[in-house]
Image (cartoon, rainbow, N blue to C red):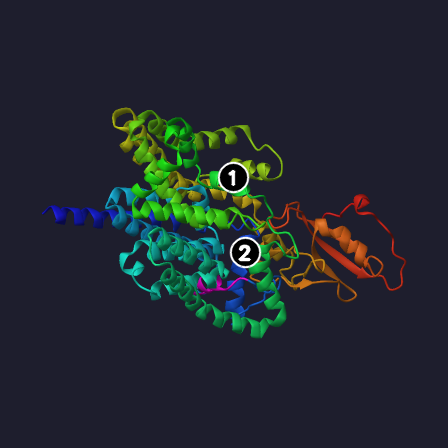
């Protein structure tokens, strides 16, 4: 009878977890427009695939030769069948959301099996889902969450599954590693294999066998990706090969031809502290509860041997990923995403340590329970005060000032406020553990209201989508003007091109006797410098909107051939655009 009760409880816990993850990551994916260049850049590759039929190395009108493997684009293109094979914001972000859900369920299953504690596993996943960096990656059209899911699932399988750890090679693990390599390159194989190898050594397995096993696993996982790399090389030739070498090896060795996200090693510490929010605040209590007398080498060694297998795997994995990404000069917060399942487990373990410090747990729970009220008060205050600030702040506050609640916004806000009230009841009447668990669920509902209402309200005004609407109206009865990009420049109009369904042609110089160009305001002086002797230019439209891709206004420019007419020099600082 007891075993049946436990089985039923576990089954319903798993079902509830699935439901919570689905609600958290699926319904609101399409609410926010693309407002950074990264998302439309990835989505355009899938659009190219569907438009051209080239599923190996598609090159669109204003995109460049892809150097990343196409797993994300394949997923987007395939999933677009749910929308008539049209790539929308929802479809573009769906692979990341599904990857997060799959990873969360795997983390739950392995944590439950390794600890024997269903509640610990359940809240490990909820903590993971409510870490800021994880939630952002799971609702963005970027390769990072898909890569993280492949890597983390492979790590958990190779280190925590008893049957797999006894095998010399494991086919599902190899396929997972192949998926990781097809998402972002060899790093997707190197990190999980290295972690599994270190864990084997920690467990005192035969060094030679462990080394050969991981080397063979790594090599076998490269076979399927090699087929794509070969096919892509046949299409892209030396240019593709040079890009792959630079992005995969030059980035690690600091020999890239251009600087890309160059930061010092301690930048990773800052990104972890920011990415773990709000749980970073919980660890502010750590200096006051650590027993410094036990931080001796002998004590640490004794403590290490007392840890369970999953504790050791989590520590080894998190430390290796952090150290690995401290080596290259190129550093970004998303590179560290594979650490977050381990950090989420650490948060839950730390909460258990703090059970004897109820004041700390209840204070943190009170902070989380107050978030729904803080958000709604801030919203009302901006509604009363009106827009303020400059640039992004002005756009965000203007968006809030102009916003009205949608059904999704009202519903999710009411749910989050109700959850906050319930949590405060737990804080006042029940123990600290129940309070913090209720607070975590409240935080989950806050993310619902954030994704359904607050985020689109703040970020949609930043998007270039409004410019596209005006461009379509301007060119309703004629061909869309091409965009001018300075040769060699890395600037691209990804967002505009995405919303134009990949129809924005890119040119490097004016063509014909007369015509129009779409030009970034920051590039306009350079256009004059390069072609003013041959053409006369007139700005006929300034959209008065800072592009979310390159933080500059966008012009529509008329040009006319001079036909021997003497050019007139006009410095950019003296030029006054003609606004239509």
**Tag 2 residue:** 40
Residue 422 percent coordinates (x, y): 29, 31
Tell me which numbered mark, 1 or 2, is placed earlier along the sequence. Answer: 2
Does residue 407 appear anywhere in the picture?
no
- Circles 1 and 2 in contact, beta carbons < 8 Å: no
Query: Which residue is situated farthest in the bottom direction here?
Result: 234
Residue pictured at 53% horizontal, 51% vertical: 34
For the residues labelled 1 and 2, the Cα–Cα distance comes to 27 Å
Give, as a single range, the part of the protein colored magenta.
68-80
In the image, is 41 to the left or to the right of 119? right
Residue 553 percent coordinates (x, y): 67, 47
Residue 181 percent coordinates (x, y): 46, 62
Count neighbours of disc 2 (C-alpha within 10 A) and say few if under 14, some if 14 to 19, many if 20 or more. Answer: many
Query: Which residue is situated farthest in the left direction here?
Result: 1
**Tag 1 residue:** 270
Query: Which residue is situated farthest in the front direction here?
Result: 298
């Amino acid at each position: 009878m007891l075993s049946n009760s436990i089985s039923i409880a576990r089954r319903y816990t798993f079902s509830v977890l699935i439901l919570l993850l689905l609600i958290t990551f699926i319904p609101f994916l399409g609410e926010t427009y693309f407002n950074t260049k990264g998302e439309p850049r990835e989505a355009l590759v899938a659009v190219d695939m569907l438009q051209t039929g080239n599923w190996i190395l598609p090159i669109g009108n204003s995109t460049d030769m892809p150097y990343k493997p196409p797993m994300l684009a394949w997923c987007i293109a395939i999933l677009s069948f749910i929308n008539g094979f049209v790539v929308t914001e929802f479809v573009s972000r769906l692979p990341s959301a599904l990857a997060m859900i799959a990873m969360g369920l795997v983390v739950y299953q392995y944590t439950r099996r390794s600890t024997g504690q269903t509640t610990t596993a359940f809240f490990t996943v909820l903590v993971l889902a409510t870490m800021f960096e994880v939630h952002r990656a799971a609702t963005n059209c970027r390769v990072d969450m898909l890569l993280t899911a492949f890597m983390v699932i492979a790590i958990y399988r190779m280190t925590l599954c008893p049957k797999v750890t006894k095998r010399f090679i494991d086919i599902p693990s190899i396929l997972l590693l192949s998926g990781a390599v097809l998402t972002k390159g060899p790093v997707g194989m190197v990190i999980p294999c290295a972690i599994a190898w270190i864990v084997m050594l920690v467990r005192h397995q035969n060094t030679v066998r462990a080394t050969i096993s991981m080397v063979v696993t790594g090599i076998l996982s490269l076979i399927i990706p090699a087929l794509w790399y070969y096919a892509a090389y046949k299409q892209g030739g030396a240019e593709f090969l040079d890009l792959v070498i630079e992005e995969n090896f030059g980035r690690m060795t600091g020999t890239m031809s251009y600087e890309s996200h160059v930061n010092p090693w301690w930048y990773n510490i800052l990104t972890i502290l920011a990415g773990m929010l709000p749980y970073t605040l919980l660890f502010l209590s750590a200096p006051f509860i650590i027993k410094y007398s036990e931080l001796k080498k002998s004590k640490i060694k004794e403590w290490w041997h007392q840890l369970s297998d999953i504790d050791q795997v989590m520590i080894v994995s998190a430390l290796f990923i952090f150290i690995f990404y401290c080596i290259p000069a190129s550093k970004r917060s998303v590179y560290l995403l594979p650490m977050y399942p381990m950090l989420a487990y650490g948060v839950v373990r730390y909460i258990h340590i703090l059970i004897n410090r109820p004041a700390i747990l209840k204070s943190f729970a009170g902070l989380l329970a107050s978030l729904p009220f803080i958000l709604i008060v801030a919203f009302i205050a901006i509604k009363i005060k009106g827009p303020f600030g400059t640039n992004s702040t002005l756009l965000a506050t203007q968006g809030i000032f102009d916003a009205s609640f949608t059904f999704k916004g009202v519903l999710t806000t009411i749910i989050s406020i109700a959850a906050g009230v319930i949590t405060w009841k737990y804080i006042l009447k029940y123990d600290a553990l129940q309070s913090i668990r209720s607070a975590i669920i409240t935080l989950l509902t806050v993310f619902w209201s954030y994704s359904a209402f607050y985020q689109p309200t703040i970020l949609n005004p930043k998007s270039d989508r409004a410019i596209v609407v005006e461009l379509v109206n301007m060119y309703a009865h004629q061909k869309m003007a091409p965009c001018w990009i300075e040769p060699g420049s890395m600037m691209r109009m990804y967002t505009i091109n995405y919303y134009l369904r990949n129809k924005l042609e890119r040119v490097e110089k004016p063509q014909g006797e007369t015509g129009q160009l779409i030009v970034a305001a920051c590039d306009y002086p350079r256009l004059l410098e390069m072609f003013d002797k041959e053409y006369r230019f007139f700005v006929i439209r300034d959209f008065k909107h800072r592009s979310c891709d390159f933080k500059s206004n966008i012009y529509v420019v008329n040009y006319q051939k001079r036909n021997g007419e003497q050019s007139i020099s006009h410095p950019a600082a003296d030029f006054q655009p003609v606004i239509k």
